Amino acid sequence: MQSTLIGDKAFYKKTFSIMLPILAQNVITNFVNLLDNLMVGQVGTEPMSGVAIVNELMFVFNICVFGCIEGADIFTSQFYGSKNLDGVRSSFRFKLIFLSCNLLLFSAAFTFWGDELIRLFIHEGSGDVDPGLTFQYARQYLKVVMIQMVPFSIVQLYSGTLKCSGKTVIPMKAGITAVCVNALFNYLLIFGKFGFPQLGVVGAALATVLAKVVEMAIVVIWTHTHREEAPFICGVYSSLKIPSVLLSRMAVMSIPLFLNEILWSFGTTFQSQSFSTRGIDVVPAVNITNTVNNLFSCAMFALGNTIAIMVGHRLGAGQLKEAVEEDRRLIIMSVCLCAVLGLIMGLLAPYIPQAYNTTDSVRLLATQLLRVASVMIPINALVNTCYFTLRSGGKAVFIFLFDSGFVCGVLVPAAFILSRFTDIGIVPLFAIVHGLNILKGILGVIMVRKKVWVNNIVESD
């Protein structure tokens, strides 16, 4: 039992060498997001609510970007494990094509139906937030922040491939630089400091665009100027040709995973929309909760990505027993660490909302929601590690059923029924919907223990 659950020094050295750069990038990114949230919140509750609504829409786009690269990245990790650079180049080209189509689709949707999408989140209700002003701020923010979708997609194309090769430091440095740029120009452009114009939410959007352009430049330039460390880039643009057999295999893997991300993101966004039916005050309160929760969940996300990389490499190299043992250790490590972080977040819940320039009712509601979210952090860590375990072996059908199947089959109906056909308050509504993830965690443990994910998908290549 000990050899399965507790690793040796080499295991933890390898784990932390991969995890810590990802964790550092996630922590700094989410901490700056919290600062950005606070800065926009200083302008007023309506601007903060408008930005929060648009961020829900951008969240769907971001998740679909991850869906575009997710299936190919499974191949990328295993190709690196088997030292097949031609396979890595093919997966890179596949991601490039898929991301381009996704970008065109969302650009059209936000351009022609942006107003209608924003209105889905604005409901009259008790509280001091003006729905009309919230809508105007959301429109202003969306028109500018859409520009960052291009550099964001390119960053994920390059950074995803680098991370799959175990090179997590450069994406970390690029991400940290970007969030520093974002924080600086948020301060300058939101409040009009040091001679810059005072642009409010438009300034926040411009700062986001600038940060993504900087991040893209760092990752792309480094990759093309360090070919010995990123050999896959040599000749990757010489053509867009992908071997037909591999193309069909990646498509069979990627399309279900892309649909999974679409359904999961829409399901998650629908939950937020259902929460918003309890009044306009819910939007800023949920925004505060999500921002803080993301910060405290950084370790969970970093360890999930570490599982995808480490276990993927083991599977690609045909080291199936080692993959199972490393996966168990990483799952336990994630749950234990996140239990501690959840406790800390729960203790800080009454104090964090006080930093926002908003109403007392929003602060009180955010405190209550933060307490609920803190309890769920270790459960979410278990779900997250099970998801990345299944993903590392490329079992697209199991991933689809486990992830979006559960969200759309359980969480969405629960949120819809409780929000539309009962008068239950927002706090118990929030707790019940998120608490159902306990069932998802149990399902994930069963699937992981059955080892349905132990699979080498690149052996024949």
Image (cartoon, rainbow, N blue to C red):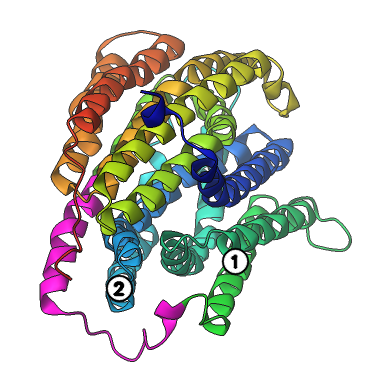
Q: Secondary structure at mark 1?
A: helix
Residue 78 place in picture, x, y as percent: 29, 60
Give the farthest residue toward the right. 194
Disc 1 marks a residue whose amino acid type is: Glu
- Asked whether residue 262 is in view, the answer is no
At x 25% / y 36%, what residue is drawn?
403
Dot 2 and dot 1 residues touching (CB under 8 Å): no
Label 1, on which residue? Answer: 215
Label 2, on which residue? Answer: 84
**245 is within the stretch colored magenta:** yes
Foreground of the two, 139 or 242? 242
Please, is residue 388 above or below residue 179 in the view? above
At x 59% / y 64%, what residue is drawn?
170
Disc 2 marks a residue whose amino acid type is: Asn
Mark whose residue sits in front, 2 or 1: 2
Q: Secondary structure at mark 2?
A: loop
- Magenta stretch: give its range: 231-260
Residue 373: assigned label: none
Magenta: main secondary structure equals helix
**124 is within the stretch colored magenta:** no
Foreground of the two, 454 or 280? 454
Count of marks, rendered view: 2
Position of 174 with respect to 329 (left or right) is right
